[in-house]
Image: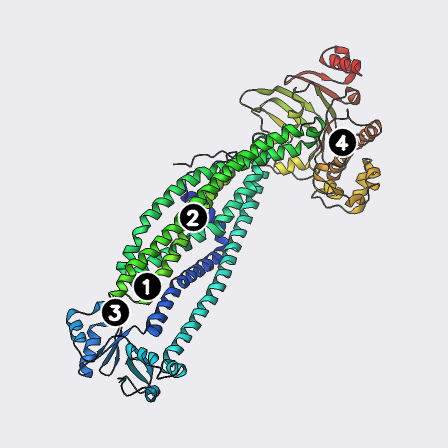
Amino acid sequence: MPRQSFDVNADDLQGKIYDRELFRRLTHYLKPYLGYVVLSFVLLLVLAACTWTIPILTKTIVDNFITADRNLVVMESVALAQQTAAENKEIKFTRYGNNLLYPASRERYLSPELQELFKNSPDWWHKVIIVEASAQSLLPDSIRTIRLDLEELALPLKDYQKLKSADGLSAVQLQSLRSRDVNKIKHFGMIYLLIIIVQLFATFFQVVYINVAAQHAMYDLRIELFGHLEKMPTSFFDSNPVGRLVTRVMNDVRTLDEMLSNGLIQIIQDFVILIGIVITMFILSWKLALVCMLVVPLVILLMKVFRDKVRVVYREVRKRTAIINATLAEDLSGIKIINLFNLQRNKRKNFQDKNDDFLAASVSELKLYSAFRPFIWSFSRLSVAIILWYGGGLILQGLITIGIFMAFLTYMERFFEPINSIAERFNILQAAMSGAERIFDLMDKEPETDEPDTMLLENDLQGSIEFRNVWMAYRNEDWVLKDISFKVGAGEKIALVGHTGSGKTTIVSLLSRLYPIQKGEILLDGINLKDYTLPAIRSQIGIVQQDVFLFSGTIRDNIVLNKEMDDKELKLVAEMVNVDKFIEKLPGKYEEPVMERGATFSVGQRQLLAFARVLAYDPAIFIFDEATSNIDTETEILIQNALEIVMQDRTSLVIAHRLSTIKNADSIIVLHKGRIMEQGNHNELLEKRGFYYDLYRLQYQDN
């Protein structure tokens, strides 16, 4: 089933957090950087392992070396001790001859027979510490010890505590008794420090690797998306606002970047940590773990409610953000009109209303998060209270150790960190899925086709043009051109005249293949226009429009564009179209910076620069959309001189607004409501006293 098409102008989020097809298309951009992704995932597992290990390390230090949570039993013989250890491997006996040392926490695995045997034995000691054999001389005769091997002695913890209270031994002597445990604690402390260092470097490189992969992948996607937009037909931009397309290329790609570099990998890491914590807790004490899990259903319910509500609120925030951005862009673009018509107060009030809506949506989102975080914190405190209540009872019953108790406290603290993180990253996934859907829907739109059978080489075009029964409509069958037919010989000068909306600009747009025709055909040098490549056609057509577009950069950049020209050729072109006089007066001359859209230049100066741009490319066909009504006489003379130079030896089409400028045209085509009403030279059309005569008479009277 095909994916439903998504409106490129939409700002709402989609309901899905995960879409398999979108993820598949996204991973295509990650494939070249798969090595970074794999390294990042490995480091993610290392970080998760560090998170699991630290509480276990704490438990080991506390149980084995601080609280001395070990029991000792002396068996009747070495053979019996060996047999008992072999038959009860889950208890983890450490055998010293006929002495068996085992962790008190493993006592629950003793069979009833062994429990009875141990507890009835006069040589069963509950909680012993291991000391150096050399410390024997420090101990009073009343303290009973058991030699485990040549280097170690075991003595009951309660007797060691008596030594501390009796003031019989100094602090230094007491410490020397437990030098073995102190050394072990130091060793584990070094391991602890090593884990922290590993976490530090693993976190750094994990973030670097995943961001390198994500940034490069989004770089490739952004380049491909921009390239795709460049190939879209002009009609596409007529129906899609530029601001929205910029949002697709920048904002939506940024949401994908955030998902790949932060959201998705963090959620995976959080899930891995959660699973590891739960498994470790059940291994340590399934009873205590089961009781701690009583809060989990409440947490899941809270996350579901939060996810549903935050989706609505976040959608509203995103929508209001788009509205306020669009309003801001429109008002800044029209700031001159706002100032001229004293609309500041009105526009400020309008912007304030949009800003109020954005503020209300943002506050709603803030309130939702403000409620969610305290609830999560309260559940974490509740779980700690459960551990204190139930875990404390298990300690008193001897079913768990203090180390296990402390590990559970740490695990439950960390259990809620990834839950909080996962909940807050739902929005990142939702925004990314919505952005991905809009991006790929845009990329699925058909670009202009450029796979003809004929390739036109530069300078091969002679410039003859023929329109054969051409019909064209921008929407459905609302025809702008109706059965247009005419011929233009190579090197001829043709003028197009007519009232606004008669179809003049549409004709030159079709010639440049900016729009497709619905009926008929256009021939260039006798070959159908569709059989040429777009670059070949457009490299041979030079256009000077009414509103000349200049790019940010320098004057040189705007004349040569991507053509290689040296300074001598550039100055020659500028002199030919009379633009050099204005350029030479500028401080930077040809390197003078051009502001956005050439805002610091006059209309006439921009048109002269456009003439230089056309002449630099030396096209076979020249099109001029004349608009000189708001240009001073001196500049108009310069433009007319430039026009004569550019039109020389070229097929030229002029969209005429001032009929006095086209008297010398080889042929004048008069258009009215999309049809050709008359065609001939200036004198012939005046003699006919038809449409052209009326247009000429009206303009002459107006002047």
Q: Which residue is mark 1?
A: 405
Using the image as rendered, state which of residue 332 and residue 345 is in the foreground: 345
Residue reaching furthest front? 166
Viewer-side residue, 202 vs 162: 162
Query: Is residue 64 visible in the rendered structure shown here?
Result: yes
Q: Earlier in the sequence, mark 1 or mark 2?
A: 2
Label 2 vs label 4, nearer the camera: 2
The answer to whether residue 254 is left or right of residue 685 is left
The relative height of residue 672 versus residue 104 in the rendered view (above or below) is above
Can I make out residue 446 in this image? no
Of the numbered discs 2 and 3, the one sitting upstream in the chain is 3
Residue 603's disc is: 4
Taking the spot 34% from the left edge, 61% from the top edge, the residue there is 408
Q: Which residue is mark 3?
A: 106
Q: Residues within 10 Å of mark 2 (few under 14, many from 20)?
A: some
Q: Earlier in the sequence, mark 3 or mark 1?
A: 3
Q: Which residue is pictured at 64% across the width and 16% down the height?
A: 673
Task: Determine which residue is flagged by label 2.
Answer: 373
Question: Residue 305, how many percent across, how many down?
Answer: 38, 41
Q: Relative to the observer, which residue lies in front, 89 or 661? A: 89
| Mark 1 and mark 2: Cα distance apart in space | 26 Å
**Front disc: 1 or 4:** 1
Q: Nearer the viewer, mark 2 or mark 3?
A: 2
Residue toward you, 166 or 426: 166
Cα separation, mark 2 vs mark 4, equals 59 Å
Q: In the displayed structure, does residue 599 sit left or right of residue 224?
A: right
In which quadrant of the rendered image does the N terminus lie? top left
**Type of the residue with mark 4:** Val
Mark 1–mark 4 Cα distance, whole angstroms, equals: 81 Å
